[in-house]
Image (spheres, rainbow, N blue to C red):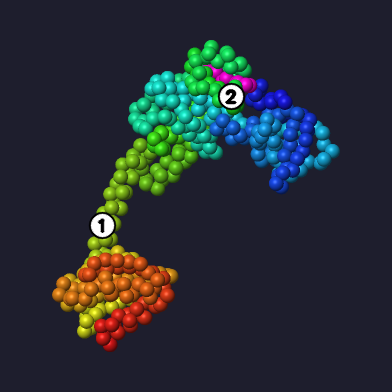
Amino acid sequence: MEKLYYHDPYIKSFSTEVVEQRKENGETYLILKETAFYPTGGGQPHDTGLINGIKVKNVEEVDGEIRHYLEQSLSKDIVKVDCELDWERRQDHMQQHSGQHILSAAFEEIYGYRTVSFHLGKETSTIDLDIEELPSMEVLKVEEKANQIVMEARKIETIWVKPEELSQYRLRKEVSVTENIRLVIIPDYDYNGCGGTHPRTTAETGFIKILGWERQRKKIRVEFICGNRVLAQLQKKHSILHSMTGCLNAPEEDLLSAVDRLLDRNKALNQLLDESKDTILQYEAKDLIKYDSEGCITAVFQNRTIKELQKLARLATQLAETKVIVLIAENDSQLQLVCARGQKAQQNMRDLLNELLPLINGKGGGSPSFAQGGGESLVRGEQLVRFIKDKYNVS
């Protein structure tokens, strides 16, 4: 079966005969006499488009046949169809795939870093390099080399070869097939076995931009974009920078300094806020011990963090060295509690907590002098208070 996409990736529309229409697991797909739709493979996603006006939502190659999955079935009597590719998607895939070849070849030519996998994503693409570290200066040098190849507008050629002819070419990696071997060649630069779609020249790839890289299972994953995606990314970032100049009342070249000043101011405000909270907690602690009880001081709060309860409990025990302090917070469907004792008190707070936790299906821990935990709101905070007061015989 002839595959037009191998011969001319620039075909945007074509007519062909229907070999068969099938339905499997509720999905309708067509087998065509010939096709320009690229099936998923080699790290490149499938083409989409229309067949007789019906959307093609997936294309796969299964057992040597290319299946075109449609959103709905065609009439059974149709023998010939008109096909139209989503050219914007096809062109984007061509740019990203050729950009990957150029980038991988640059990494290997300059530093000997081998590409072991490629993924063409919806917004960005990635290659995995067989290395564990990647210095930023090397990235800049590789990106510069790749874009030099782009600007030289070198030809991108595709040829079919036999296995015995492979030794004539300086292949970047071994081919994965033994028949129907297709090479994608950028003369004097990159020779690679590939079945994907590519433009006619490196210039049509458009500029290549490396966005970042990270370590992934003893490999380095490099994220990049090419062609129209670079322009879209530039426009997006330009819009963000333009908005920031208005928000920060600073020209673009001073944005970094303006952000640093804003962060410093925010840090100072947060410090002031923390100090204010601590002051309020000190007053709260004094208020707690005003209502002194014989052996235990308790309080129930709404929507307080465990950290706030802990601070308040420590402050209260400093002011009431002979007392037990139990603080409870009702937070939506959760209860949190802190049990603390003053320096001169003898009760075991971990034991007290362990008596309370089963009442709320909770978990927690701590020391004999200070313990905390939390659980479900199976009982009200006041019921826990009553339990504690009964334990310590406090009215």
The residue at the far bottom in this view is 395
Q: Nearer the viewer, residue 358 or 143?
A: 358
Front disc: 2 or 1 = 2
Say if mark 2 contacts mark 1, CB within 8 Å: no
Residue 232 point in image, percent of width and height: 51, 36
Q: Quadrant of the N terminus?
A: top right
Left or right: 289, with 180 as reference point: left
Image quadrant assignment for residue 58: top right
- Magenta: predominant secondary structure element? strand
Residue marked by disc 2: 177
Tell me if residue 252 is in the magenta stretch.
Answer: no
Q: Secondary structure at mark 1?
A: helix
Image quadrant assignment for residue 42: top right
Residue 132 seen by the camera: yes
Vertical position of residue 111 compared to residue 378: above or below: above
Residue 15 seen by the camera: no
Q: Residue at x 29, y 66 (%)?
A: 365
Q: Residue at x 36, y 31 (%)?
A: 134
The residue at the far right in this view is 77
Residue marked by disc 1: 271
Vertical position of residue 254 compared to residue 203: above or below: below
Q: Residues within 10 Å of mark 1 (few under 14, many from 20)?
A: few
Name the amino acid, label 1: Gln
Vertical position of residue 337 compared to residue 68: above or below: below
Residue 301 point in image, percent of width and height: 34, 74
Magenta stretch bounds: 179-186
Q: Earlier in the sequence, mark 2 or mark 1?
A: 2
Q: From mark 2 to mark 1, how far is it between C-alphas? A: 64 Å
Name the amino acid, label 2: Val
Q: Nearer the viewer, residue 245 or 235?
A: 235
Q: Quadrant of the C terminus?
A: bottom left
